[in-house]
Structure formats: structure tokens, C-alpha cells
Amino acid sequence: MRLKFIQDAVKTSRCSHMRSRRDPMVRAIAMALLVLVAPAVEGHAAAANRRPQFAAPTRGEFVSVCAVSHRAGDDPIVFPNRPGASHSHDFFGNPSTDAMSTTESLAAERTRCSRSGDAAAYWVPTLYQDGKPVMAKVVRAYYRRVTSPATAITPFPFGLRMIAGNARATTPQDLLVSAWACSVDGDEIEVIDVPTCAPGRPLRLRIVFPDCWNGRDLDSPDHKSHMAYSVKSRCPSTHPVPVPRLVLSIRYSTRGGAGVTLASGGAYSGHADFFNAWDPTELNALVSTCLAGSKSCGPGADDAIPDLAPKSLPETVTMLPSNTGSPAIGVTPAAAPATTSAAARSDDAIGRDAPMFCQISAAA
């Protein structure tokens, strides 16, 4: 509310100035309000859209575009050998992933990703809207280097398992770890609450994995402690081995809005799992050429994703109450900056500041 008030005041001041220069009182009042309210608004925006200190620029990447494979209440990392013990997940890439999966069983399966050597398993909690499951359209797995020096980057070890995000979160997570957005070409604005997207802009969930490994363990009891996020492009001494920063961008067949939640709980519980079964030779080559070489390699020459048709499995999950509060994103060019700061722009695209218009629309 305060942010809209101050935007309207500034717009009124600028528009009044263009209409006439003989009304200094209007401009003086608007600028006084700006001075008084701006610090509070800026502090609120910073708290709501905070970036943790491990944010860093990308210095090379390659992409694996994967189709949704199936849906099941399995989790071979958290509940290995226990079919149906987990909340519902949507699985991408490797169609064989289930509660019984091992590194060897995954590596033996044909992938549904754009890169033929990507036999890794990716999964996220099933998204629901008004109690009904929503099928994900596609997932893009971005492998990036944000650490220095370039020559220190190391491929994921074969069989590495890790989880990013907090499945039990009931309050917003850091935007760099878990964030929502409306998918567009060229500009995506990260927000903490599920947005209502404009037509043609599907809802997207982004999860960012840590990029430093302890150099010993392929997993840990909490499936996180063997990994850490780099700070100012450097890995901590406890986790000295820099590995690719994996970013999952999941696009859904919905525009978001009210009634959206996740199988793990509310909309704040975004998280994802990664089980590495990449062909070591191909992964090593991509890390060496694209990440250590500071190049943007894209999704690969074999861009067509094989066998896109997902399997439909019965749902047995009891839904938990969802978080509400769905700001409108992408409705008008002037509406987006009121929702989040420029610092929360997506890593998927370069952000551009929306123009300020003198006409204040009802949707703003």
C-alpha cells in the first residue's frame, strides 16, 4: 500500500510538472511525501525480496531441457526403498526414477532431456491449484559457474545426491533459493508469493542448488550438509570443492493466482532434488568447455526432447492448507516494479526497468 502511494505521488508530481510549471505546491507536497516514506518502503522491499550474500554473476553455463516423466509419491533420496512414503513429486529427465533407484539403474536408462548424456534424476513437489494437480510443461536445468578461479570448477561426482530449498517452510525462503515468476522472453521478475500471470505467461518455479562440495560425501543425513553455497565467488573452507551451480526452472500449465500450493505444504515450501547419473565423460567435457571456459553453451545440438508424453499415475496425497496472497505480475508494464525490486530479477534473463507512465491505471 505504501509503495503504491509513493509511486502515485511521484507520478502525480511528474505529470503536474509536464502540464504546468505554475503549480509548485503540488510538486513540493509530493516530494516531501517521497522523502518521508521512501526509507520505510525501501526497507520493506528489501526484506520481502532479499538476496542472500552468496549471489554472484554467472561465468559460463550449459543447459539441459527435460520433459516431465511421471508423478509418484516416491523419493529415492529421503525415502529410499520405500515406495509411496513421500508426498507427490513430478519427475523430470530420467523416466525410471522411483523409490528403488540407484546410480547404476539411473545411468542405464535413456533420458528425456535434450542432452543425451544427462541421465540424472530431477524432481519437485507436485503443484496443485484448487486441489487439482497441474502438469509441469518443461524443466530447464541450468548448470552454471559462479566461483573463481575458472580452473577450479569440478564436475559433480557420479552418484551425488542433494536437496535445495526447504520442504517445511511456512514463511518465504530467500529468493535466490526458491522463487516464483511469470515466464516471458527477456524479463522475469522473481517474487516470494505465487503471482497471477498475464495471458501467455505461464507460472514458473525456480530452485537454486548449492555449488560447493565437502569433497568426501555423496550424501549426508539431511541431504544438505555435504553441500554449501559459495560466498563472493569463493567456497568456504568446510566445503572447498567448487561444483556447478544447478538452477532448475520449472514452467507450469497455469497462470498461477489463487489456490496454488505444493504437495509438500504451502506455496513457500518450494524445493527440489537432484540425483546425479550423468555420463561422466559428457559431463566432464561440458564442465571443461563451458564452465571452466566461461562460455554459454545452451541446450546442446540434440535439442529435441525424446518421448514427451508423461505418464499419469494415481494421486494418493492429502493436501495441506495453502498459503494465499497472489500479487498480479505482468498485467501492465508499470505494475511489475511495485511487486519486487530490480535486485530480484531472474537469472534466466536480463532485467529491464519498466517505464513510468503519467496515466495511473486502475490495475497499478
Image (cartoon, grey):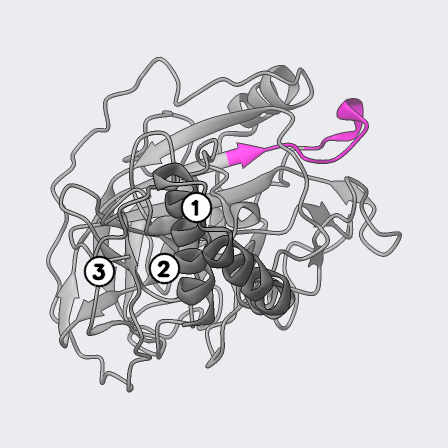
**Residue 176 in view, yes or no:** yes
If you read the primary sequence from the N terminus, does the residue marked by circle 3 or circle 2 appear first? 2
Q: Mark number for residue 256? A: 3
The local crowd at label 1, few if under 14, some if 14 to 19, many if 20 or more residues have their Cα within 10 Å, is many
Q: Position of residue 72 (x, y in %)?
A: 24, 65
The local crowd at label 2, few if under 14, some if 14 to 19, many if 20 or more residues have their Cα within 10 Å, is many
According to the image, label 2 marks what residue? 124
Taking the spot 57% from the left edge, 69% from the top edge, the residue there is 44
- The residue under label 3 is which amino acid type? Gly
> What secondary structure is marked by label 1?
strand
In this picture, residue 279 sits left or right of residue 128: right
Looking at the image, which is closer to me, 91 or 36? 36
- The residue under label 1 is which amino acid type? Leu
Quadrant location of residue 234? top right
Quadrant location of residue 302? top left
**Residue 76 in view, yes or no:** no
Marks 1/2: CA distance?
9 Å
Asked if the stretch drawn in magenta spans residue 237, the answer is no
Marks 3/1: CA distance?
18 Å
Looking at the image, which is closer to me, 231 or 123? 231
Q: Quadrant of the C terminus?
A: bottom left
> What secondary structure is marked by label 3?
loop
**Residue span colored magenta:** 143-154
Furthest toward the front, the residue is: 22
According to the image, label 1 marks what residue? 248
Marks 3/2: CA distance?
17 Å
Looking at the image, which is closer to me, 124 or 8? 8
